[in-house]
Image (tube, rainbow, N blue to C red):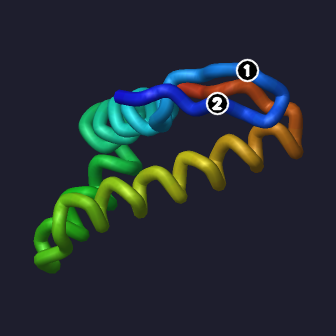
Amino acid sequence: MGVEIYASGQARPAGNRWRATGTATRLAAACHNPVLKTVTKRMRKHGKPHKVVIIAIARRLITIANAMLKTGETWRHQAG
């Protein structure tokens, strides 16, 4: 991994650190959240590639997070 140099002179590691964290989050959600687990199974049953399934889970997580921020609610564990 290289280093990016910005006009201000700052140097930062190149690459997207959030990508690895996000991938782990999406995989955990797809495996352990009952709602997202059923979505994952349904998409895999219909023959969707792994990357398509993970991106769909990511989009759903973003939608859930935005709704939680908008309403001010906290996370409630869904029994499954």
Residue 29 quadrant: top left
Measured in 3D between alpha carbons, the distance from the residue under mark 1 to the one under mark 2, in whole angstroms, is 6 Å
49 in relation to 78, above or below: below
Q: Earlier in the sequence, mark 1 or mark 2?
A: 2
Q: Is residue 78 visible?
A: no
Which quadrant: the N terminus?
top left
**Above or below 39: residue 71:** above
Residue on which the image places disc 2: 5
Left or right of 48? Residue 71 is: right
Residue type, mark 1 in image: Gln
Give neighbour class at mark 1: few <14, some 14-19, many 20+ (Cα, 10 Å).
few
SS class, disc 2: strand
Residue at 37% in and 31% down = 20
Task: Tell me the residue that label 1 is attached to.
Answer: 10
Query: Left of 34 or right of it: where is 8?
Result: right
Q: Which mark is residue 68?
A: none
Does the residue at mark 1 contact the one at mark 2 (Cβ under 8 Å)?
Answer: yes
Q: Residue furthest bottom?
A: 46
Above or below for 14 versus 44: above
Image quadrant where residue 31 sits:
top left
Which residue is at 15% across, 79% downward?
Answer: 46
Q: Position of residue 22 (x, y in %)?
A: 45, 36
Residue 2 drawn at (x, y percent): 41, 29
Q: Is residue 70 visible?
A: yes
Please name the amino acid that badge 2 sits on.
Ile
Question: In this image, 69 relative to 62: left or right?
Answer: right
Q: Nearer the viewer, residue 59 or 11?
A: 11
Residue 14 or residue 42, whichever sits in front: 14
Q: Position of residue 49 (x, y in %)?
A: 17, 69
